[in-house]
């Protein structure tokens, strides 16, 4: 089943009936058991985001971009020849959209599990992307040791090299491991603009393999998953991730709301089976503005306006355009002077900072421009 997700297409081993049934069953089950949580799945997550986007478009509500992708787009848009290393790339849900949106980027997708790696390569070919280098390896010691993969019975995003509870089954599949420093050395990398680490609790050990490369001048930005349960299973805690960043000259923030974190006391309550994403940036770097709900709403309406204009003009000429052709024409308009102003351009025109109550006025005035 092929599903569009973040401007890419993913070939998933699921059917709409299976996922709709699973969604309905989960909602019914929670009526009787409030603690019930549907088994997580990367494929299921993509399918549900697809449904939310379709329903949101029908109801007039914008689709919210993934916080990590929103940050990565903002960071790399003005970076010359960016280098990205994604540890735990899975089937490509983060590397493929980034590779498509930033074609100048060189992206290293590290995924040890053979099944996920094959799906990643399949989806990469499906989207015709050539700026991704896939590495079928785990990240560990620099002596190229062998590690046994542990298979998660319900979630392809939960495969790992650590025994993590009742859903974990040893697969008999062994993979080699290298260090992050080895990757820098083999590919002659002098810097990394963005390092993403999502390894189901092994994240602290992955960061340690950077050794002396763990410096803001070399690895400039790090997004690392904070999975308290997974960290605890290897004798670590969120405190270790925070201290890793602080001791090496980074500022630690929460990716979602940019709140600065200096100790575990600054962390919000993390429910069981939930995770947070930490953002490590150089101390002298300003704040990155993630896209706000108002900005997303405005830019969504802006693109809808351009889309309608393109389709109407084509229809008047007796031309029928496909969705891809409309998207391409929108990109061409955005790169020209005839494009409507973005939310930030409009905000700057109306005033550098708008009080929260005036966000609606911005949208109303933008329609008159």
Image (tube, grey):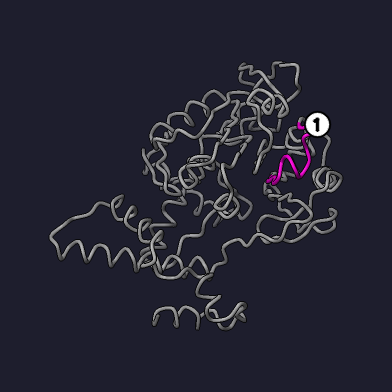
Predominant secondary structure in magenta? loop
Count of numbered labels shown in the rendering:
1
Q: In front: 347, or 165?
A: 347
Q: Quadrant of the C terminus?
A: bottom left
Magenta-span inclusion, residue 211: yes
Q: Position of residue 303 (x, y in %)?
A: 39, 64
Q: Are there few (<14), some (14-19), or many (20+) residues within 10 Å of tag 1?
A: few
Q: In front: 31, or 291?
A: 291
- Please report the bounds of the magenta region as a residue range: 210-223
Q: Position of residue 15 (x, y in %)?
A: 37, 39
Is 284 placed left or right of 119 in the picture?
A: right
The residue at which mark 1 appears reads as 211
Q: Position of residue 193 (x, y in %)?
A: 65, 43
Q: In the image, what residue occupies the spot 79% across and 54% down? A: 283
Q: In the image, what residue occupies the spot 29% across and 66% down? A: 308
Is 249 placed left or right of 112 in the picture?
A: right
The image quarter containing residue 189 is: top right
Q: Position of residue 103 (x, y in %)?
A: 47, 42
Q: Is residue 361 above or below residue 137?
A: below
Q: Is residue 63 above or below residue 99?
A: below
The image quarter containing residue 67 is: bottom right
Element carrying mark 1: helix
Most distant residue in the left direction: 318
Q: Quadrant of the N terminus?
A: top left
Magenta-span inclusion, residue 333: no
Q: In front: 103, or 154?
A: 103
Q: In the image, what residue occupies the spot 80% across and 46% down? A: 245
């Amino acid at each position: 089943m092929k599903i569009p997700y973040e401007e890419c297409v993913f070939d998933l081993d699921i059917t709409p009936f299976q996922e709709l049934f699973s969604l309905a069953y989960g909602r019914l089950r929670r009526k009787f058991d409030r603690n019930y949580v549907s088994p997580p799945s990367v494929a299921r997550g993509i399918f549900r985001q697809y449904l939310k986007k379709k329903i949101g478009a029908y109801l007039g509500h914008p689709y919210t971009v993934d916080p990590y992708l929103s940050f990565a787009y903002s960071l790399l848009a003005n970076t010359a020849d960016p280098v990205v290393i994604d540890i735990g790339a899975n089937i490509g849900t983060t590397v493929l959209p980034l590779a498509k949106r930033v074609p100048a980027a060189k992206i290293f997708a590290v995924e040890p599990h053979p099944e996920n790696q094959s799906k990643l390569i399949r989806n990469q070919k499906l989207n015709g992307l050539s700026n991704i280098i896939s590495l079928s390896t785990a990240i560990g010691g620099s002596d190229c040791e062998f590690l046994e993969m542990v298979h998660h019975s319900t979630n392809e995003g939960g495969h790992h090299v650590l025994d993590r509870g009742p859903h974990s089954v040893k697969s008999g599949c062994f993979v080699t491991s290298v260090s992050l420093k080895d990757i820098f050395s083999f590919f002659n990398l002098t810097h990394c603009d963005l390092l993403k680490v999502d390894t189901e609790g092994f994240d602290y050990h992955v960061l340690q393999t950077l050794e002396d490369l763990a410096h803001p001048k070399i690895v400039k930005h790090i997004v690392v998953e904070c999975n308290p349960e997974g960290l605890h299973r290897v004798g670590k805690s969120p405190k270790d991730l925070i201290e890793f960043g602080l001791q090496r000259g980074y500022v630690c923030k929460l990716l979602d709301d940019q709140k600065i974190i200096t100790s575990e006391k600054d962390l919000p309550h993390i429910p069981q089976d939930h995770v947070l994403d930490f953002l490590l940036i150089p101390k002298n770097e300003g704040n990155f503005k993630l896209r706000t709900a108002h900005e997303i709403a405005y830019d969504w309406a802006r693109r809808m306006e351009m889309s309608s204009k393109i389709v109407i003009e084509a229809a008047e000429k007796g031309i029928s355009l496909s969705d891809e052709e409309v998207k391409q024409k929108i990109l061409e308009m955005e790169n020209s002077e005839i494009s409507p102003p973005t939310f930030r351009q409009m905000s700057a025109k109306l005033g550098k900072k708008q009080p929260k109550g005036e966000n609606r006025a911005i949208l109303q005035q933008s329609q008159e421009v």
